[in-house]
Image: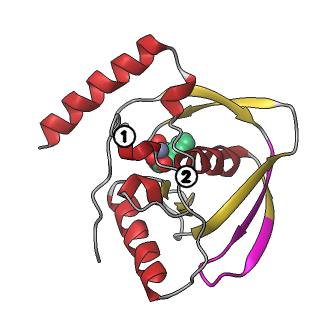
Amino acid sequence: MALLPILHYPDPRLRTIAKEVSVFDDDLQTLIADMFDTMYDAKGIGLAATQVDRHVRVVVMDLAGENEEPRPQVFINPVVTPLTDERCPYKEGCLSIPEVYDEIMRPARVRIEALDADGQAFTIEADGLLAVCIQHELDHLNGVLFVDYLSRLKQDRARDKVRKVVAKKG
Ligand code: K1U
Ligand code: ZN
């Protein structure tokens, strides 16, 4: 098990645009395993490689509830297409912006095209938390954070909050 350090807002490395994955080798499998370890340890439901300073288009996710069996999902080179103009609000959090939550509006239903850990292509349609989470994670791969959708005042407050939380944790 390897825990990877998570970058915190406003670290400029979170603004890096991740590169497509073309090689499905042991190094990629190690990165995926380490990302799951890191996500579960941090009590998150998703994690993008950008957040652990690896700038490749890899997302891990597990939306299972506390009393359910784990349901790990891997999305490599994800492409997300809105399927409706309807937008739904969801109070989002982010492991890179600890203890900051705010309501973000995103398309309610999306198509996700991606590769799995073995490089096999799959397509799914998603709504609810999966739709929210994949859009949040795809933003990370493109250097975008949920606070970018908020006012400058809220961004300043988020930056101050993260500084305090990170200083307290040591
Ligand atoms: O990308 C990340 O920073 C992970 C993030 C994913 C996410 C959560 C909620 C909405 C959109 C994206 C988190 O997991 S933050 C932790 C969190 O908010 C949460 C944890 C457990 C259950 C529900 C939410
Ligand atoms: Zn996030």
> Which residue is painted at 53% across and 20% down in the image?
150
Q: Is residue 105 above or below residue 29?
A: above
Q: Which residue is mark 2?
A: 141
The answer to which of 157 and 37 lies nearer the viewer is 157
From this viewpoint, is residue 122 visible? yes
Q: Amino acid at mark 1?
A: Pro
- Check residue 12 in the rendering and tell me which mark sits there, or answer none: 1
- Indicate whether residue 106 is drawn in magenta: no
In this picture, residue 165 sits left or right of residue 59: left
Which quadrant is home to the C terminus?
top left
In this picture, residue 33 sits left or right of residue 65: left
* Colour theme: secondary structure
Callout 1: few (<14), some (14-19), or many (20+) C-alpha neighbours within 10 Å? few
Residue 153 is situated, as x and y percent measured from the top left of the image, at 42, 11
Q: Which residues lie in the magenta part?
A: 109-123
- Looking at the image, do the residues carrying marks 1 and 2 touch, with CB atoms under 8 Å apart? no
Residue 61 is situated, as x and y percent measured from the top left of the image, at 54, 61
Q: Is residue 5 above or below residue 76?
A: above
In this picture, residue 163 sits left or right of residue 91: left
Residue 42 is situated, as x and y percent measured from the top left of the image, at 34, 54
**The quarter of the displayed image where residue 22 is located:** bottom right
